[in-house]
Image (tube, rainbow, N blue to C red):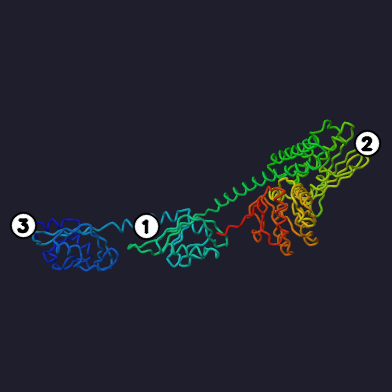
Amino acid sequence: MHSSDDLLEALPIPVYVTDAEGRITFYNAAAAEFWGHRPELGSLWCGSWRLYWLDGRPMAHDECPMAVAIKEGRTIRGAEAVAERPDGTRVPFTPYPTPLKDEQGNVVGAVNMLVETTRRKHAEVESARLAAIVMSSDDAIISKTLDGKITSWNAAATRIFGWEAEEVIGKPITIIIPPHLLSEETEILARLRRGERTDHFDTIRLAKDGRLVNISLTVSPIRDGSGLIVGASKVARDVTERKQHEELQRLLFDELNHRVKNTLATIQSIASQSLETAASPQHFVGGFNGRIQALARAHDLLVQGKMKGASVMEIIREQVVLGSSDGTRITCNGPLVQVDPQVAMQLALVLHELATNARKYGALSPAGGELSISWKLLMRSASEIHLEWRESGVPDVVAPVSRGFGTKLIERTLQGSGGSATLRFDTGGVVCELRLPLHSEGRAAAGSIQGETELRQGHLGRRQMGDLRGKRILIIEDEPLIAMNIESELERAGCKVVGTAGTVETAQDLIGSARIDAALLDANLGGRPVDEIAAALAQKGIPFAFATGYGRDALPPAFREAPILAKPFTAEQLIEVVQDLVASGASMPAGVVVLRPNKS
């Protein structure tokens, strides 16, 4: 053995030498360990049992980098291959074949150094690292084949969807896809086969217990070593909480929008009705301002109570006692009980009208007199508050010849919430008996937010509405002031209002008993949906329109293509909608906003 061979033998790196024909003339112990056996000297090109390209294809020995270096007389660098040992293990390596030449430049042999690459080790470390990330991730990470079979399922997927890994691996991914969204999977698979990534789209998936889960989904293709797409990785983030926040925000904005519009509509109705009965501009201004102040004081009480309601005593104090010059002439007696926001506003208006009349003509006028306000709670089929307003000591009490706006307001205001008001003129003064429903807090909140419709004031004297004369119209509206204003405008146009309904039950009774040409329907009554009412109208063939400040999404699903009269609206727009309803097949007139459902 030559001294150079001694040096090569001592190297810890696999090294071997060949002659000019590629026959092995020497290899060190490290090379034998690398090959997994000791080949015979004279073997051609290399001592590997078998060789493979990196993509797994067999490599002939005469195609190996050492053979190319000898045949072409050049140094080979950057090549990679896989050697298979007799025991079947495969080792990726990088060869460094270098031709040996004589003084004339002729190839007389070659030396090759084999460096086992760390690709596998790196892959194993990387795989372990990725596995740890996947298992500890808060997002569901799922892999699947191109035919939709689940191949991996992490702990977050179990937490979000409820299935254990052993329950779903090997099963189709469609077990977590709702039936109506199966088309999404078809599109995702098509994109995967094109090598496209699906990035962050919101959708819904199905949990083991039947829950629908809002998720944000990302889908990426998985490729093998040769670049072929063999599957997909899905990352699903549970966005239920975010969706709930978005929905809450939307509801809050809708509520704010509705409350603002409803307040404006109520003011418009008060202005319109006050103007009709005012004897003079000064009389109108005084009555209008007083009613607005009554609403403002009632609203302050509701804000103090976080919009959950107000107590009867607080409303009496704000509307009656604080406005009296001599509070000793007023006695109040009743339990501490709270009414919902809608009833609170209505009661405030009624008490304001009674107190204003008492200060001008009755028990609280300078002529003297006394006022007694008492209320009690009755428990029957439903809870009710009965309140009695009784004036005494008022001489020469005479009932008015005509019924003004104040009298109508007192008598009809509470009807929208299922209550009532009875007004009479006794020998000692005015007596008013009120019946107020006492809803649960949750029901009251829903009713006050959703059960009101809005209008703008308007006058029709300049319009010719003969085509509506005698038409029988049903008004379904739980806000008395708005219903009164609609009724006035329709009657001025020649319509006959067959009734006003402030509750679902009243509306059903009128639909079943009255002959009706058209109906105006609030989007809900006292917080209750109006699906049944809309269905009853449709079944009877009665055309109707929704008058609402909400969008089309708030309408009953089966009737979302029905006409909508967007609020607030003018009297002219109101009449135009009614004209369209009673005219079979007429197109919606200009100026009326009719929303169409999104078909996308």
Mark 2: secondary structure: loop
Where residue 127 is drawn, which disc sits there? 1
Q: Which mark is residue 176?
A: none
Q: Is residue 340 visible?
A: no
Q: Quadrant of residue 334 in the image?
A: top right
Image quarter of the N terminus: bottom left
Indicate the position of residue 33 as horizontal and vertical percent values: 22, 62
Of residues 175 and 482, the one drawn nearer to the viewer in this rendering:
482
Query: Mark 2 packing: few (<14 Cα in 10 Å), some, or many (20+)?
Result: some
- Relative placement, left or right, of 92 versus 246 is left
* Callout 2 amino acid: Pro
Tell which circle, 3 or 1, labels the residue nearer the N-terminal end.
3
Vertical order, 118 against 260 (above or below): below
Of 155 and 385, nearer the camera is 385
Callout in the foreground (3, 2): 2
Q: Earlier in the sequence, mark 2 or mark 1?
A: 1
**Horizontal side, residue 87 vs residue 454: left or right:** left
Q: Position of residue 508 (x, y in %)?
A: 77, 59
Mark pair 3, 2: CA separation = 143 Å
For residue 295, side relative to residue 122 (left or right): right
Could one spot residue 585 in this view of the protein? yes
Provide the secondary structure element on which disc 3 rests: loop
Could you say where residue 212 lies in the image, as x and y percent from the top left? 56, 59
Q: Which residue is mark 2?
A: 395
Residue displayed at 82% across by 53% down: 380
Residue under the point 32% across and 63% down: 226
Per the model, the C-alpha gap separating discs 2 and 1 is 99 Å
Number of dots carrying numbers: 3
Q: Distance from label 3 to label 1 (Cα)?
A: 51 Å
The amino acid type found where label 1 is placed reads: Ser
Q: Is the residue 311 above or below the residue 41 in the image? A: above
Residue highlighted by disc 3: 103
